[in-house]
């Protein structure tokens, strides 16, 4: 157990699960009291909610994909370095795109769909890299 707690992948998994919770909390900023909302007089702080909803949505969906990858990496630790080479460039690009994307107009894609799509792409590519490394190791053993 002591050796397990020293494992950086475990702590990255814990951090990403915490990120899911923070993203959920930020996404519901009216309900959690972060932004002003008076339901009786129907007055709301919309700009506060839009900011927290954008940050919360991107955190909530991306951290789910990241947590899935770290969960798999706990069981396939030798693939960490290969995955890291991919994640170092993909994750910053993904978060930059989340920050600059604006849902404008009738035909634009909703932000939540963009968050989901890029998170699924990230998870699929990451799992493919991890699976490839796992197969390579099995081939060298046999």
Image (tube, rainbow, N blue to C red):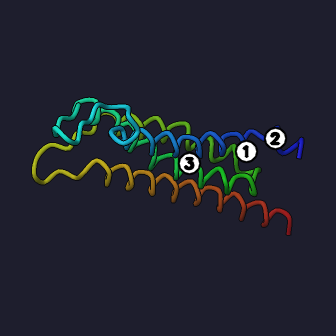
Q: Position of residue 131 (x, y in %)?
A: 65, 62
Label 3 or label 2, whichever comes before in sequence order: 2
- Is 109 on the left or on the right of 69, as rendered? left
The residue wearing badge 2 is 5
Report if the CB atoms under discs 2 and 1 are less than 8 Å apart. yes
Residue in view at x 85 percent, y 69 percent:
142
Residue in view at x 46 percent, y 35 percent:
92
Image quadrant of residue 137?
A: bottom right
Image quadrant of residue 50?
A: top left
The residue wearing badge 1 is 10
- Outermost residue on the bottom side: it is 142
Q: CA distance from mark 3 to mark 2?
A: 19 Å
Report if the CB atoms under discs 3 and 2 are less than 8 Å apart. no
Question: Viewer-proximal residue, 109 or 52?
Answer: 52
Q: Any mark on residue 28, and which? A: none
Q: Position of residue 86 (x, y in %)?
A: 56, 44
Which SS class for mark 3? helix
Which SS class for mark 2? helix
Select label 3 or label 2 by which is in front.
2
Q: Position of residue 45 (x, y in %)?
A: 23, 31
Is residue 42 among what the camera can see?
A: yes
The residue wearing badge 3 is 66
- Is 121 on the left or on the right of 127, as rendered? left
Q: Position of residue 16 (x, y in %)?
A: 58, 43
């Amino acid at each position: 157990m002591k050796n397990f707690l020293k494992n950086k992948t475990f702590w990255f998994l814990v951090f990403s699960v915490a990120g899911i919770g923070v993203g959920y909390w930020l996404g519901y900023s009216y309900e959690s009291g972060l932004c002003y909302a008076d339901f009786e007089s129907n007055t709301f702080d919309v700009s506060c909610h839009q900011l927290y909803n954008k940050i919360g949505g991107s955190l909530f969906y991306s951290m789910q994909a990241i947590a899935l990858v770290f969960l798999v990496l706990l069981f396939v630790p030798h693939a960490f370095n290969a995955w890291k080479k991919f994640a170092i460039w993909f994750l910053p690009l993904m978060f930059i795109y989340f920050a600059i994307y604006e849902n404008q107009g009738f035909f634009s894609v909703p932000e939540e769909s963009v968050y989901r799509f890029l998170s699924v792409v990230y998870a699929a590519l990451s799992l493919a890299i991890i699976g490839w490394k796992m197969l390579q190791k099995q081939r060298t053993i046999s």
